[in-house]
Image (cartoon, helix red, strand yellow):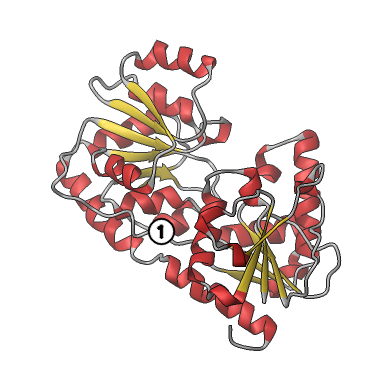
Amino acid sequence: MILFDGIIYKLQSSGGVSVVFNELLSRLPRESYTLLGFKEEPPLNLSSENYIYESPRILERYRRALISHNFDLFHSTYYRLPAVKSCKVVTTVHDYTYERFASGFRRAVHSFQKRKCISESDKIICVSENTRQDLLEFSGASYEERTVVIHNGVSSDYYFRPEIDTEPQLIFVGARSGYKNFKSVVYALSSIEDINLVCVGGGGLSRTELKFLEKYLSGRYRHTGYLTNSELNLEYNRSLCLIYPSMYEGFGIPILEAMRAGCPVIAINSSSIPEVAGEAAILMDTGEPDEILNALKSIMFSTVRDDLVVKGLAQSKKFTWDETFKKTLDVYEELLGKNI
């Protein structure tokens, strides 16, 4: 029996890490696992038979998980360990954003917890080769034999709808802070008339962001908030491109979502992004406004855009959640020495 520590479902209502575990749990035999959760109602419409509710303690996120039953394997959704190690432990490492871009107390606490979890794990799953290299850099080469790269997938909810007309809009998905390069996008787009910017997710627009957008893109932006997969697929299909100029990503699921939806991608040639995008995107060097502007202008040529659509559809087929699940199941069965 596998115990999933569902701390991520307490920390966020949606997001890339939640998506990964949603996809894994949906494919496992119901009799093979239990989810430990900290909300009275289980997530994902999960059966109560597969769910153990624990009243959250103070600072639950940073504490070891209390286990009241016997399990063969423990897999935390976000860098935790069992209070008493009586079974095999698997950890998934998603990225090293904190280590590369945070500072002070937040970075120190997160990095300590992550390193501790890695050090006591029997197997460490990295979502990209770039993340594995980051792990070896920050935690040491001694962990190399314990690591395995298992790429994330992309949902079949995203698909190309050629009957939908492309509209004069760019789509920006996710957080907009510092290394995400959001300001550079706004500066670049301010030089092109009659093209709008659609921001999806990433929390509500702050007063500072609204003031900034009104100054450079007045009347040419909107924030959708959270979208369902179906709604987001529609936005991808009608956008000129996904603009994704993040300087660092552990994986970058929106790149594949856009490609599956026939939406060309402009991104930066850094971290895991070339590993995911392959040769099916326009990859910039720095993501400075002038570079973004030039990339956007090239998208305006129908032949360039059409070529990227075809390449993107082919590239996105290389990543599936079925394959992610199969490789993760292989890890579990290797550690347990039996089929699940």
Residue reaching furthest right? 84
Lateral position of residue 302 relative to residue 266, left or right: left
Lateral position of residue 219 relative to residue 329, left or right: left
Quadrant in which the C terminus appears = bottom right
Identify the residue at horizontal 53%, vertical 41% (top origin). 247
Identify the residue at horizontal 85%, vertical 62% (top origin). 83
Identify the residue at horizontal 28%, vertical 62% (top origin). 314
* Number of marks: 1
Q: Nearer the viewer, residue 55 or 249?
A: 55
Q: Position of residue 254 (x, y in %)?
A: 42, 48
Quadrant in which the N terminus appears = bottom right
Identify the residue at horizontal 41%, vertical 58% (top origin). 154
Q: Which residue is denoted by mark 1 in the rendering?
A: 154
Q: Nearer the viewer, residue 179 or 126?
A: 126
Q: Nearer the viewer, residue 213 or 281?
A: 213
Residue reaching furthest bottom? 338
Relative vertical location of residue 307 with respect to residue 314 in this rendering, above or below: above
Relative vertical location of residue 292 with respect to residue 329 in this rendering, above or below: above
Residue type at tag 1: Val
Lateral position of residue 86 relative to residue 272, left or right: right
Relative vertical location of residue 187 with respect to residue 34 in this rendering, above or below: above
Q: Position of residue 80 (x, y in %)?
A: 75, 57
Q: Secondary structure at mark 1?
A: loop
Other residues around mark 1 within 10 Å, as few (<14) / some (14–19) / many (≥20): many
Q: Position of residue 87 (x, y in %)?
A: 78, 75
Q: Position of residue 339 (x, y in %)?
A: 59, 87
